[in-house]
Amino acid sequence: IVCVLVGVLVLLPLTKIFLSGKGRKDDSSASGKSLSQLVKEYGLSHNLFRLRVPQGSGASGKTVVDLDLRNRYGLNLLEIRRGEGGQHRFLKTVSQKLASSDTVFQPGDVLYLSGEPASVSRFSSDFSLEMMDDHSTETAPGSGNQLDFYDIGIAEIVLMPTSNIVGRTIKEAGFRDKFNLNVLGIRRRNDYILHELGGERLHSGDVLLVQGTWQDIGRLGNEDADWVVLGQPMVQAAKVTLDYKAPVAGLIMLLMIVMMVFDFIPVEPVTAVLIAAVLMILTGCFRSVEAAYKTINWETIILFAGMMPMSLALEKTGVSEMISGTLVGSLGTYGPLAVMAGVYFTTSLMTMFISNTVTAVLMAPIALQSAVQIGVSPVPLLFGVTVAASMCFASPFSTPPNALVMPAGQYTFMDYIKVGLPLQIIMGIVMVFVLPLLFPF
C-alpha cells in the first residue's frame, strides 16, 4: 500500500512533465505494421458480423463455392471458427479455419463476415443462420466479435517488377491453390481495392493483404522472387496470445502457488513449477511445445545460473563478510538504520546494471552477515534487499515489467532516467524508514 501511494504521488507530476507527448507517434519498429494496424488500414473490422450455422441450416454441408458469398451478397468471409460456441467456456477450445473454396460448413460453425448490414441480413435469412450479436464497426466494436489471429494470420506482400504473376488476375495467380492463401485486399499507390478481387489484374508494386495459417504465411519468404514480404509476420504471430485460455492458465498458476506455499502438500517448489509448465502445454495454453519453448527467456536463466555460483563463491571466500564488514564499519556506529540504508541503496544501485533476481542473490548473504555483525534481526535487511531489487525504475533492463512497457509506451532510455530515477530514490528513502516499522530489528 505504501509503495502504491508513493508511486502515484510521485508519478502523477513526473509523467505530466516528461511523458506528456508519448504514445502519439506512429510505431515504426522493424517488425512492421501490427495486426491491428493492418485490420484498421484495410477496413477488415468495418461492418463485422458473426453468424452461427444451426442444425438444419441451409448452409450446413455446403462449401464456400456453393454459397458464392462475394458475387451473390457482396460479403467477405474472413474466417470460420469451430468450438467457440460451447457452453463450457472454461474448457473451450477455438479452431480457426481458413475460408478456402472447398471448406464445408458444419452445424455450430461461427462465420466472421464483413459487408453491408442489409446483405448480411439477407444472407442470414436465405440460409436460416443465427445472428450472434450486433455488428461491429471500427468506431463501435461489438461484444466479442473482434478478429483474432490464433491460428490464422494476415500479412502484406509487395509484387516485384519481375514477378511472373504481374498481369494475371487474382484467380489466375492461384494463391488459394498454390499457397493456400486468400487475398483480402490490394493497395495500389493510395487506393485500396477490397471488393470483387477475383478478376482484378495485378500490377507491379501492388501490395496484397494475404490471409492464411501462420505456417503458410511463414513460408511466403521462401518462395521465388515474385514478391517481398513486408515487416516480420512471424514476430507479430509470436505476440498473439490465446486469451480464451486465460481462465485455465490462471487456475494452473493458482494451483502452482498453493503447492509452493503450503507445507502440508508434499511437493517441492521445483516440482510444482514443472507440473504447472506441463499442464500449460497439455491444456492448450500454448499452440505447441515449440511455442512454449520460444517463450523461455534463456538470457535470464543463463545469467541467473551463472550468478548462483558467484554468490556461493562470495560467501565461501569471505568476500561477502568483507563487504558486510565494510558496511558495518562505515555505518554501524550510526545504528542499524544506517546499515539498512547502505544495504538498500547498494542493492538499488546494482539492480540498475544487472538483473534484479541476480542482485538479490548476491546481496542477500551480505545483508545477512551485516545483521549478524551488528547483532540485529536480519529480517528487515533481507526485506530491504528484496524491495530494493524490485524497485528499480531507472533502467528498462533491470526487471521484466520495465522491459515489457518500453515498446508499448514508446519510451526511450532517458525516459526511465528522468522519471524512474527520482521515483527510485524517493521510494528508497521511504522504504528505509517504513521497513523497520513493519519488521523491527
Image: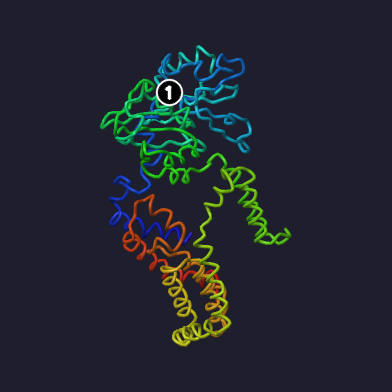
Residue 11: x percent and y percent? 36, 58
Residue 160 on image: x %, y %: 32, 36
Q: How many marks?
A: 1
Residue at image coords 59%, 43%: 247
**Along the line of sight, the residue nearer the viewer: 306 or 129:** 306
Q: Is 20 left, or right, of 108 in this rendering?
A: left
Mark 1 residue crowding within 10 angstroms, few (<14) / some (14–19) / many (20+): many
Q: Position of residue 1 (x, y in %)?
A: 48, 59
Secondary structure of the residue carrying numbered label 1: strand
Amino acid beneath label 1: Asn
Q: Quadrant of residue 71?
A: top left
Q: Where the C terminus falls, by quadrant?
A: bottom right
Q: Nearer the viewer, residue 121 or 239?
A: 239
Q: Is residue 207 left or right of residue 54?
A: left
Q: Nearer the viewer, residue 212 or 247?
A: 212
- Report which quarter residue 403 is drawn in: bottom left
In the rendered structure, the answer to whether residue 185 lies left or right of residue 334 reads: left
- For disc 1, the marked residue is 76
